[in-house]
Amino acid sequence: MPEGHTLHRLARSVRDAFGGRVVEASSPQGRFAEGAALLDGHRVVRSDAVGKHLLVGFSPAAASARRAPQRWLHVHLGLYGKVFFGAANGAVDAGSTDDDDGEGGGALAAPPAPVGQVRLRLVTLDAAQGAGPLRWADLRGPTACEVMVRPEVDELRARLGPDPLRADDGPERFVERAGRSRVSIGALLMHQDVLAGAGNIYRAEALYRAGIDPFATGRDVAPERLAGVYEDLRVLMRAGVRSGRIVTTRPVDRGRRDDEVDGTPVRRGQAGAHYVYRRTGLPCRLCSTPVATTVVEGRNLFWCPTCQAPGTQVSPFDA
């Protein structure tokens, strides 16, 4: 499932492609026909992300691009959702919901016929009026795709924990919610109502970098250390937004070989990118203890039994 930095990259791609533009909305698959009809002929005036949720704001075509959105498109990609962008000048971005680079395509005068189960297609309607190039986007396989009004958006945000990538969020709610819980911190970081946007990779890597035992309960982790995890995630996830990749290691700690042991090829630019994620049985990059794994919250959790031993109070960087 895409982690939060990917959704913020996607929000930026939507903003770049459709910001201020009037669009035609359709559902080639048919499953979102009623929702698409509510957005058809409207102007995209906002594109934002909260945790793993994409929120695109629409106003009537006659409204100013600065007007507050009348309706919101809410998308949660889940495990299989992807968005593909295209433009008449040949620019095609097939990588906005993947941690990789997009691919260029040949120049097209009109959107190609939909391929596969396209839940929603957006196409600019105002290109002929000189508002900008013809652009389109196809959404396939999301877990959620729905139209919301502002109270529903506010309710969604209230259910979520703070998002480290949002300037209007901070660590306070995370520290408060995690700090009173008897649930392990390794589980809490996967709870989107505690912290929005972090997933399995960021969970493992942030706890390792902080030297926190993943099985310690939230209430047993000092508030300043919880705040430190949040601020570190802010740094790591901002880097992920910039690069499109999750890299959590310091340059001095990175290996030069493919070092995932499950047979999965290391992706371009990812060799040596993680301290513990998918490194079961391999030596810790800092202390050489074999990395361990177990299932927590339905996903494999990776940790170093030495650098994150119970009672450890310092980051392995400072040990």
Image (tube, rainbow, N blue to C red):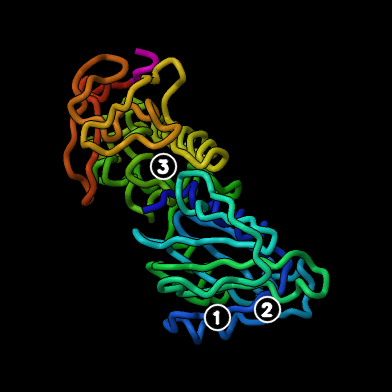
Secondary structure type for disc 1: strand
Left or right placement of residue 50 versus residue 229 in this view: right
Residue 26 disc label: 1
Precedes in sequence: disc 2 or disc 1: 1
Residue 116 is covered by the magenta coloring = no
Q: Residue at x 21, y 36 (%)?
A: 262
Residue type indicated by callout 1: Ser
Image vertical order of residue 24 relative to residue 267, above or below? below
Q: Residue at x 50, y 80 (%)?
A: 27
Q: Residue at x 31, y 18 (%)?
A: 285
Residue with the mark numbered 2: 42
Gap between marks 2 and 1 measured at Cα: 12 Å
Residue with the mark numbered 3: 175
Closer to us: 177 or 129: 129
**Labels 3 and 1 touching (C-beta < 8 A):** no
Q: Quadrant of the C terminus?
A: top left
